[in-house]
Image (cartoon, rainbow, N blue to C red):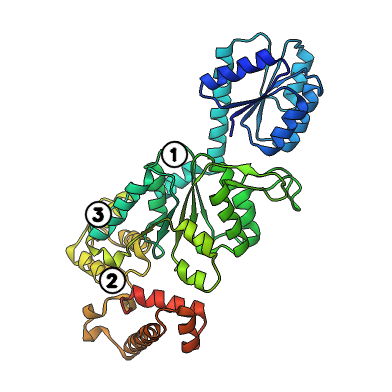
Amino acid sequence: MADVLIVEDKLSFGEMLKTSLDDAQIAAQYVRTGREALQVFKKERFGICLLDLRLPDIDGIDLLKEMRKIDDDTRFVMMTAFGTIERAVEAMKLGASEFLTKPFDIEQLIALLNRLLQEQKCQRENILLKDTVQRAYGSPEIIGKSAAIKKAMELLQTVAATDTTVLLLGESGTGKELFARAGHNLSPRKDEPYVALNCAAIPDELLENELFGSEKGAFTGAFARKLGKFELAHKGTIFLDEIGDLDLNLQAKILRVLQEKSFERLGGTTSIKVDVRIIAASNRELSGLVKARNFREDLFYRLSVFPITLPPLRDRIEDIPMLVEAILKKLGSKKKINPDAFDKLAKYNWPGNIRELENTIERSNIIAKDVIQAGHILLPESELKWENISVRDKDLKTAGGMGRDLAEAQLIKLVLEQVEGNKSEAARRLKVSYKTLLNRIIRYKQKKLL
């Protein structure tokens, strides 16, 4: 995909411009007529259009008007050997960024084009709220020394240098977003856009517009062309979080992007080529969704070329001191934490993983004056590891809940063994929905009952 479209009827001058831009590492495409320019402009996206004011078939001002209707994100630089102040003013009013009179210095043109391209890149980064997201999440530093987290980090470092699609698997709060950012920063695309989208956070009827964009007039309220996340991520990385929540129609469109590197905007008829690296994530068992016909099998195999499973926090308890230190530093706190408090943190199952740990430490930091004690660590007793709960901590209600969980977990395990892991059949035998069974399995795995 070219950065600049050159529209110039004089062959020698047009070819010279293209050669000069190519030499300056600015990708350019050259056409000689207004009609050719419109055909190309409707099919492809350009950062800048270098447009001659006098063409053999269409007046440059008229062509500028038509092109602005198609894409108002493109910057236009008008050029002519017959420049007048009136024509320059007219072009500027219609949205042209600059007006050049031939002959002009090629070095100055290249400097101008680089400036406009950089301005456009910054504008798109603002659309992505890059600075806001960076402040919200902090730098993508993965913390931990446990064998489980080291294994995941080694896999990430291995695949980061490639364009291979990565599938991050793990429970909510295990750091999939952090791993995706680190994967982008370790890749050759690190200086290009990183775009993240939570597929579960946006209603299905709006998600397609967010992913692929829309043309002007595609639906009520579409007053201008909207660039989707895939276009904004061109040359960079797109992170699709909770991809298991996509409906089947959108799954087919994601599959097309993976296979053909192209898509169509809502209301559009032409294919748009994009160069993006996809990192997807899910806290759901995608293979189970495939069996239940809620997730496309072909998309599942495309996404799971390089799966990385992130360990839950209960499987990397030894990392808690390092994580707590990092959380307190992020909060700007200089408070120390008592060893008894660390012991209490180590005895908890952490169903919410690192996200829950962050919330717990932030709350404790507010409560404690100087040193965070065990009493400042407020945790629900129902999630404390059973072997660490003394008799005096239990009452009949708590014990009843524990007994029910244990009985359910054992029954689920027995039935799954009988049906050789077929969750749909297990749900039928247990007389619950597939979703209910899946939620129970996740819950009891978190409690180490399965």
Residue that carries the numbered disc 2 in the rendered image: 348
Assess whether mark 2 and mark 3 are in contact (beta carbons under 8 angstroms).
Answer: no
Q: Considering the numbered disc 3 on the image, is that residue within a helix, a strand or a loop?
A: loop
Identify the amino acid type marked 3: Lys
Point out residue 129 in the picture as x, y percentages from the top left corner: 52, 44
Query: Quarter-wise, where is residue 323 in the image?
Result: bottom left
Residue at 52% across, 59% down: 299
Q: Which of the two discs, 3 and 2, labels the residue nearer the N terminus?
A: 3
Q: How far is disc 1 from disc 3 in space, using C-alphas?
A: 39 Å
Q: For label 2, count other residues whose C-alpha is less than 10 Å away and answer few (under 14), some (14-19) or many (20+).
A: many
Q: Which mark is residue 335?
A: 3
Nearest to N terminus: mark 1 or mark 3 = 1
Question: x and y percent of residue 47 in the render?
Answer: 61, 31
**3 or 2: mark nearer the eye:** 2
Q: Nearer the viewer, mark 1 or mark 2?
A: 1
- Quadrant assignment for the N terminus: top right
Q: Amino acid at mark 1?
A: Arg
